Image (cartoon, rainbow, N blue to C red):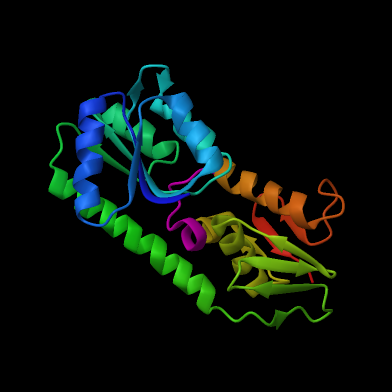
């Protein structure tokens, strides 16, 4: 199943009330009340945005965020009664997109969610509008923006949204060294994300397209600088 929003909060009454309010404004929403249920739900369902509390009965929202960020770029908005700047900085540094303090205004929270949903939709439409017949000079790799797939030597490979955006940027700059800062700015939007985030996505791309990820033919590291897609 696909949902616009998943609320993860052990305050059941607040989570249910927020979900009911969102549904009134055509935001398809679901609630879970623990870290484990959140990860189980995401294994079998897709969502556009996640509202995530920090203090959960069976774990920490911080750990949930870190786990999700290993495989997904889903927007995460933290909702928490914790007020300190340190908590906010941790939430943003580990991959959170926003932080809303409790008690929150339902109308303001809905507005933030709708803005995020609009951004997600714009990214999807942008990817779909890209040319699907861009072909490398040696025909080894072609890019299909409509389906977020690439073709490597006749093999079709599906990529996640952020993986595709990263690969497509390297593809458009093929045979040119691209710095890490340039990738963080143009793929993630700023340099706030760590090198680790970029390195994880590069590794996943190599695992999907390279015959030997440890000795890449296409995506090569330029030590101390960045990467180059050689075609």
Q: Is residue 113 left or right of residue 199?
A: left
Question: Where, by quadrant of the figure, is residue 216 drawn?
Answer: bottom right
Q: Is residue 131 left or right of residue 216?
A: left
Number of marks in the image?
0
- Residue 152 is a magenta residue: no
Residue nearest the viewer, comparing 144 with 174: 144
Give the residue at x 52% y 71%.
127
Question: Where residue 101 appears, x then y in whole percent?
Answer: 20, 34
Give the residue at x 60% y 56%.
163
**Residue 83 in view (yes/no):** no
Q: Which residues are magenta?
A: 185-194
**In the rendered image of this protein, does residue 82 appear above or below residue 188?**
above
Question: Where, by quadrant of the figure, is residue 88 drawn?
Answer: top left
Give the residue at x 62% y 49%.
201
Question: Where residue 102 appears, x then y in whole percent?
Answer: 18, 31
Residue nearest the viewer, comparing 183 with 140: 140
- Residue 192 is a magenta residue: yes
**Residue 20 in view (yes/no):** yes
Name the outermost residue toward the top: 57
**In the rendered image of this protein, does residue 205 appear above or below residue 16?**
below
Question: Where, by quadrant of the figure, is residue 177 drawn?
Answer: bottom right
Question: Where residue 115 appears, x then y in whole percent?
Answer: 28, 59
Query: The C terminus lies in which quarter of the figure?
Result: bottom right
Give the residue at x 67% y 60%.
158
Question: Where residue 156 appears, x then y in whole percent?
Answer: 76, 65
Q: Is residue 17 left or right of residue 165?
A: left
Secondary structure character of the magenta stretch overall: loop
């Amino acid at each position: 199943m696909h949902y616009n929003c998943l609320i993860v909060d052990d305050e059941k009454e607040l989570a249910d009330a927020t979900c009911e309010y969102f549904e009134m404004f055509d935001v398809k929403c679901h609630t879970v009340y623990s870290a484990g249920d959140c990860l189980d739900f995401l294994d079998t369902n897709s969502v556009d945005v996640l509202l995530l509390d920090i203090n959960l009965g069976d774990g920490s929202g911080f750990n949930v965020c870190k786990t999700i960020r290993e495989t997904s770029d889903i927007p995460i908005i933290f909702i928490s009664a914790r007020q300190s700047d340190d908590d906010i900085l941790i939430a943003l540094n580990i991959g959170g997109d926003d932080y809303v303090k409790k008690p929150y205004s339902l109308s303001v929270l809905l507005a933030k969610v709708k803005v995020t949903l609009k951004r997600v939709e714009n990214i999807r439409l942008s990817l779909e509008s890209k040319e699907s017949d861009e072909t490398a000079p040696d025909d080894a790799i072609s890019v299909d923006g409509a389906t977020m797939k690439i073709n490597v030597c006749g093999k079709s490979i599906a990529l996640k949204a952020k993986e595709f955006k990263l690969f497509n940027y390297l593809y458009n700059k093929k045979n040119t060294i691209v710095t890490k800062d340039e990738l963080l700015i143009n793929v993630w939007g700023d340099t706030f994300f760590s090198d680790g985030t970029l390195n994880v996505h590069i590794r996943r791309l190599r695992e999907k397209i390279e015959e030997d990820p440890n000795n890449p033919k296409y995506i090569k590291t330029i030590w101390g600088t960045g990467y180059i897609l050689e075609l």
